Amino acid sequence: MGNWVENEGLSIFVVLVWLGLNVFLFWWYYLVYDVPPKFFYTRELLGRALALARAPAACLNFNCMLILLPVCRNLLSFLRGSSACCSTRIRRQLDRNLTFHKMVAWMIALHTAIHTIAHLFNVEWSVQARVEEKGTLAAVLSSLGDKPHESYINFYRKTIGNPVGGLYVAFTYLAGLTGVIITLALILIITSSTKTIRRSYFEVFWYTHHLFVIFFIGLVIHGAGRIVRGQTAESLAEHNPEICYKNFTHWGKKGACPIPQFSGNPPMTWKWVVGPMVLYLCERLVRFWRSQQKVVITKVVIHPFKTIELQMMKKGFKMEVGQYIFVRCPAVSRLEWHPFTLTSAPEEDYFSIHVRIVGDWTEGLFNACGCDKQEFQEAWKMPKIAVDGPFGTASEDVFSYETVMLIGAGIGVTPFASVLKSVWYKYCHDATNLKLKKIYFYWLCRDTHAFEWFADLLQSLEAQMQERNNAEFLSYNIYLTGWDESQATHFVMHHEEEKDVITGLKQKTLYGRPNWENEFKTIAGQHPGSRIGVFLCGPEALADTLNKQSISNSEADPRGVHFIFNKENF
């Protein structure tokens, strides 16, 4: 169990606390509306649906308070970089910000569904009570407010029956109209957030996600109509509903119970969400300020496998290994921001990103930088670029371990370019203070061309380690996962050569996929009693495999070997 807490996403403690608070709020507010005499007559009118609508509303307030916090990137980066605020364990939880964001979103969807269904019954029964025959308690309650000096309990004041009455409530009352709008906004946000949409139609995801502005505006004013009403404290003092309801036909007569008075619940949502909304507003202002700072593209390098490298400079820009930035190119789109891992090292006087051309936006950036032209492009012809960041990721913790496993799949190798470059610079100067003693590097790629842009870095690092008699510092394994018959024949013919035919490195390229169980067991045997950091930038299926191996190969004894799994997540 302890190993699961270390490796699998959010810790069990965090998840249980969050779920526990949801359960507590649901049950507490259910009882608030289902037990006290204040809502006795409201329950007579609406039944159990009253409490079933209000309990999820409280949970919605709580989760809508949380939903914005995981996407306040600058706040999280500040907390992550502050050793006074965050231990390594807490930083690992901050790295799961998007996982928590998605969990909260699904909880919001669940409570929205319960809240909406319950209110559909409430509306139907409220409308029905206004048009049903006289003489029933529901009819008497619904008629309150028709005469002077009376306050109403049934918010529906027309005498039009269902289904027209229900539609009238949905599209003319503030609560109904805002409810329809925020529900539609939520449906669009969630459906456009699926992995397929994000990867294939990122623009759709980007634009629909900004419906959250409409969602929060609607959420704040949703309760302003005060349609949920209860008996006032003054009325309860002289009209006990548990006694007086039996004689409802005599209310207001001499010697009988006075007519009950009612008032609406004041809106409460704004009290829950105003703090996070202010924080998020500050977040967006910081992003806007950063986006206005001048960024100069100093160099554009075209690499094989539809990959370009942008080298940039920006005044005051400081980074750590493995961090990422958001990039906007107004020549392509004035609104879209896209995340890219930094491939440069902190020791370099520029910062760089590698961009694989896989969609409309990246294709537009490729053309804007003049990469589609044969002639040399002058610096002044480079497009304007806005940069927000850098932001912290799990890869920042690489130098906190003595032994690490770095696993990159395809273009997912980019975070480790920054790490390996930084290691190279440290060895070029002084590595005596470097805690990191051993790197196991794995790169999985489908195509041979993908190796070319990264091979130079590995060759430099390989030579540097050998010069310093520390060739064992870096063990790297490059796996080619896709090849044809002609390539295989060529590889076999040149297998005996000193250097690899693909990469030019002494370490030969391997074919197929790693046997992860064997890899973990071998590393565990070579480093007993160590905490080994496992860092991945790659697909979810590989993440699941590595996470399971990290758990199964970690020992229960605190003094034994432990694999700590980390995944790039932005």
Image (tube, helix red, strand yellow):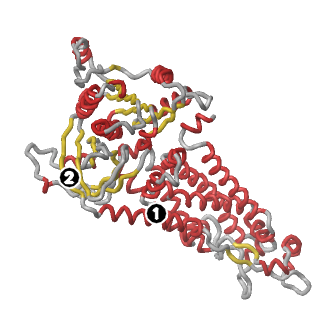
Q: Secondary structure at mark 1?
A: helix
The residue singled out by tag 2 in the image is 297
Horizontal side of residue 107 vs 463, given as left or right: right
Q: Position of residue 156 (x, y in %)?
A: 65, 73
Q: Position of residue 284 (x, y in %)?
A: 40, 63
Would you say residue 305 is visible in this rendering? yes
Three-letter amino acid code at disc 2? Answer: Ile
| First in sequence: mark 2 vs mark 1 | 1
The residue singled out by tag 1 in the image is 280
Of residues 437 and 440, which is closer to you in this image? 437
**What's the residue at 46%, 63% (across, down)?**
280
The residue sitting at the right extreme is: 255
Would you say residue 478 is visible in this rendering? no
Disc tally is 2
Question: Depth-wise, is mark 2 or mark 1 nearer the camera?
Answer: 2
Horizontal side of residue 470 vs 311, given as left or right: right
Q: Position of residue 336 (x, y in %)?
A: 32, 56
Distance from disc 2 to disc 1, alpha carbons, whole Å, reads 30 Å
Q: Position of residue 420 (x, y in %)?
A: 32, 36
Of residues 543 and 557, which is closer to you in this image? 557
When the figure is inspected, residue 539 is found, relative to residue 137, above or below; the finding is above
Q: How dense is the environment of label 2, judged by Cα within 10 Å: few (below 14), some, or many (20 and up)?
A: many
